[in-house]
Image (spheres, rainbow, N blue to C red):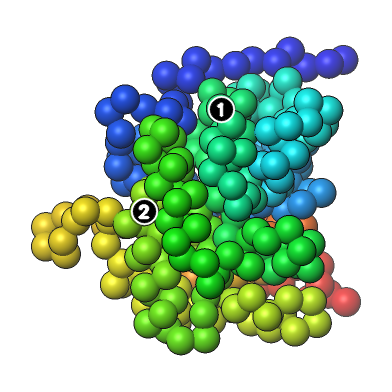
Amino acid sequence: MIEKVTTKPVAEIVTTTSTTNPTGRTIFNKLNKPRKMLCPLVDHSELAFRILMKKYGCDLAYTPMLNAKMFAKDHKYRVRNFGPLDGKHEMDRPLVVQFCSNDIDELIKSCEYVKDSCDMIDLNLGCPQNIARSGHYGSFLMEDWPLIEKLIDGMHTAGLNNTCKIRIFSDIDKSLDYAQMCVNAGAKWIGVHGRMREQRGQATGLADLDYVKYIKEKIVPKGEDTEGKEEQVVISNGNMIYPEDINKVLEYTGCDAVMSGEGALYNPGIYNYTEDDDVTTAEGLDKI
């Protein structure tokens, strides 16, 4: 039997475009402060997996990274990667749609197609794969700050509830400056993956949460000073393998939320636990 699709009016959640231009903190609070998030995962974080994760404790999910150039120009690509049920099922919200892009016109056109079926739209600035190098997007924009500013500012100026997800530089203060630049350009949330661009494949290693913590402590919202103002929403990415890592990472970094990628693939129930659960090992592993 096919389950009847239920939808929520966009106004009941958060419209991705806004005439009042809410702050990132306002949006975060309106979405019930989602602390446990599913990373954008190419070939994995599609609708069915997002709903599975939501069923087992995930608060908010990202779509896989979508190529804005193809999404803007190719109808078949759009239908194949963001179908009529995406963002419509009540268990598929809150939802963040993620695009990679290096062209503001293509990016904004792509956003127009999805803005009423999601809660936020994210710019991918973290993909380290060779296809991102050849396509000049993701983490291979890290040296082109003027282009990144143009992309984020264009989304912000268009009234979109926009976010971005970055990687770190080897220098911690440069990493902070980079994150602050993204926020000043208009990113309402910022996801910080505590790995450098070179950390991928067999060289992945552990994420450096000291960088994430430092950015969270020092960064300020767009147009705000540091006294008596709301804090910037920062999401920690990296080192999320076991359920016990959730509170450990949140407490250490001070971030507003965590996101899990590989950990969620290993265990889609990573967020489904209580304080009384034994979460130090995968179920049954200690019996082997």
Q: Is residue 14 above or below residue 6?
A: below
- Residue 150, percent across and down? 45, 51
Q: Residue at (63%, 60%) from the top-left corner?
A: 138
- CB within 8 Å, label 1 to label 2: no
**Element on which disc 1 rests:** helix
Q: Quadrant of the C terminus?
A: bottom right
Residue occupied by mark 2: 185
Q: Residue at (49%, 58%) from the top-left corner?
A: 148
Q: Residue at (27%, 62%) from the top-left corner?
A: 220
Q: Is residue 218 above or below residue 30?
A: below
Outermost residue on the left side: it is: 227
Q: Amino acid at mark 1?
A: Glu
Q: Which mark is residue 112?
A: 1
Q: Is residue 150 above or below residue 170?
A: above
Q: Within 10 angstroms of label 1, few (less than 14), some, or many (20 or more) residues?
A: some
- Relative horizontal placement of residue 91, taking residue 15 as reference (left or right): right
Q: Quadrant of the N terminus?
A: top right
Q: Is residue 233 above or below residue 12?
A: below
Using the image as rendered, state which of residue 103 and residue 96 is in the foreground. 103
> How many marks on residues?
2
- Residue 118, percent across and down? 55, 31
Asked whether residue 266 is in view, the answer is no
Q: Residue at (59%, 47%) from the top-left corner?
A: 103
Give the CA separation, mark 1 to mark 2: 20 Å
- Residue 203, percent across and down? 75, 84
